[in-house]
């Protein structure tokens, strides 16, 4: 199979959360452990930082990778989902995994995948670990897919575990309360392994402390320990929390491991994160006059901050291109959007995309008025044509909406 056929096979073979949602969620690590054993336990050769959290884990992972690259290390970076191409998920020093490696890996292991009915995510995690082990990376930043405790990435023994924050998202899998979700994320805390928590709430802090105690792990709350942050090319208001988290992780690496990172490495890593890692979709400006901003925030915790930043912008009229996936709690997120805006409702082009007419109908209950469009690109095009040079266009609601305009 060529690259496109290989990727198509992986996507279609078995449920994939990005496309299908609930049916893709596995309830244990049996398959991942089976695959790991079959591949010769590549994760045991890796030195890792493990990053979980409701929001900010992508930015945090990319910032960590960028800084460690600036410090001269060969850095593996595993993140999800991808925006345009599957290869974005697996990088070394910002360079995406080759098409040939993916094709060979799937060809060599296809019968094992089929016999054991591995999910898309399980295969991808095995691929990433195998790739990093063969490439002999110095350190690897491994982002959790969803949750933590039962996530396929949770077979690693990291140098540091990181939990960025807890908000209500994926409640059908992780629980409907903040403490239940915190318990799932805290499942990445390992025995005698330091854990850094970015933000906490009254409901979540006790959960983290209890799990750290049970694992005899030192726990560090970055929001209490880091006062000043270095400037970054990532200018979203929410990045302040991610930067504090990253800086505390680096303090621990410097203190307890043989990895050494200077303030200059942090400064350069923060400013060159897009250049070093290819991160996209985080309060990203796509055009000027009219100004066009896109952001992948897609739950109430993330959108609260982004909507506040949006309202602080200067513009004559606001145009919002909005699409979501079908498992979002619309009553939770729609009230956060400004009523004084013209909406362009659309459906992201994945199976889980919510019909734009349903979104529009629900949005009207919250005073959000606009028209329904047949696609994200059509909605975006209409917004650009309607906007004056001093207007602002915001594109968001889902990672997959942003992916279609990049």
Image (spheres, grey):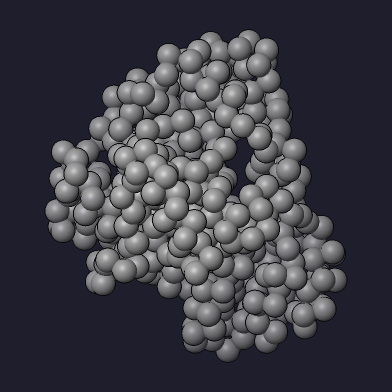
Please name the residue shown 29% across and 24% down the image.
136
Q: Nearer the viewer, residue 141 or 379?
A: 141
Q: Is residue 395 visible?
A: no
Number of marks in the rendered image: 0
Q: Nearer the viewer, residue 284 or 161?
A: 161
* Side of 241 relative to 32 (left or right): left
User: Could you say where residue 305 lies in the image, as x and y percent from the top left?
Assistant: 51, 74
User: Could you say where residue 185 lies in the image, as x and y percent from the top left?
Assistant: 51, 49
Please name the residue shown 54% across and 51% down the image.
183
- Is residue 92 shown above or below 180? above
Which quadrant of the figure contains the C terminus?
bottom right
User: Could you say where residue 292 lies in the image, as x and y percent from the top left?
Assistant: 53, 71
* Side of 72 relative to 8 (left or right): left
Residue extending farthest to the bottom is: 316
Q: Is residue 23 visible?
A: yes
Q: Write down the quadrant of residue 214 in the picture.
A: top left
Please name the residue shown 49% across and 85% down the image.
312
Which quadrant of the figure contains the N terminus?
top right
* Side of 2 relative to 218 (left or right): right
- Is residue 343 shown above or below 64? below
Q: Nearer the viewer, residue 167 or 9?
A: 167
User: Could you say where residue 114 lies in the image, as x and y percent from the top left?
Assistant: 67, 15
* Side of 69 relative to 53 (left or right): left
Please name the residue shown 34% across and 46% down the image.
217
Q: Write down the quadrant of residue 247 in the picture.
A: bottom left
């Amino acid at each position: 199979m060529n690259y496109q056929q290989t990727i198509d096979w992986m996507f279609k073979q078995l449920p994939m959360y990005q496309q299908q949602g609930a049916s893709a969620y596995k309830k244990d690590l049996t398959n991942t452990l089976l695959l790991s054993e079959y591949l010769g336990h590549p994760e045991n050769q890796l030195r890792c930082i493990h990053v979980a959290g409701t929001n900010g884990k992508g930015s945090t992972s990319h910032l960590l990778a960028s800084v460690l690259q600036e410090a001269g290390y060969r850095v593996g970076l595993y993140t999800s989902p991808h925006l345009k191409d599957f290869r974005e998920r697996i990088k070394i020093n910002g360079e995406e995994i080759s098409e040939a490696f993916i094709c060979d890996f799937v060809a060599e292991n296809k019968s094992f995948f089929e016999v054991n009915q591995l999910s898309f995510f399980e295969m991808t995690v095995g691929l990433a670990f195998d790739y990093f082990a063969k490439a002999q990376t110095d350190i690897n930043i491994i982002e959790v897919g969803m949750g933590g405790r039962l996530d396929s990435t949770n077979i690693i023994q990291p140098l540091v575990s990181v939990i960025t924050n807890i908000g209500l998202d994926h409640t059908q899998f992780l629980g409907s309360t903040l403490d239940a979700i915190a318990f799932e994320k805290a499942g990445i805390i390992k025995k005698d392994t330091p854990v850094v928590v970015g933000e906490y709430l009254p409901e979540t802090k006790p959960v983290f402390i209890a799990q750290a105690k049970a694992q005899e792990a030192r726990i560090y709350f970055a929001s209490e320990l880091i006062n000043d942050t270095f400037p970054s090319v990532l200018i979203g208001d929410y990045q302040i929390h991610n930067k504090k988290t990253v800086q505390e992780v680096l303090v621990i690496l410097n203190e307890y491991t043989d990895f050494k990172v200077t303030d200059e490495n942090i400064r350069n890593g923060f400013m060159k994160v897009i250049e070093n890692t290819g991160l996209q979709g985080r309060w990203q400006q796509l055009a000027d006059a009219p100004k066009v901003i896109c952001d992948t925030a897609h739950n109430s915790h993330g959108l609260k901050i982004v909507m506040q930043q949006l309202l602080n912008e200067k513009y004559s009229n606001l145009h919002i291109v909005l699409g979501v996936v079908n498992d979002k709690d619309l009553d939770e997120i729609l009230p956060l959007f400004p009523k004084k805006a013209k909406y362009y409702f659309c459906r992201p082009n994945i199976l889980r995309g919510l019909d734009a007419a349903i979104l529009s109908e629900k949005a009207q209950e919250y005073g959000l008025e606009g028209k329904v469009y047949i696609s994200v690109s059509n909605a975006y095009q209409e917004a650009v044509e309607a906007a004056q040079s001093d207007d602002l266009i915001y594109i968001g609601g889902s990672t997959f909406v942003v992916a279609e305009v990049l």
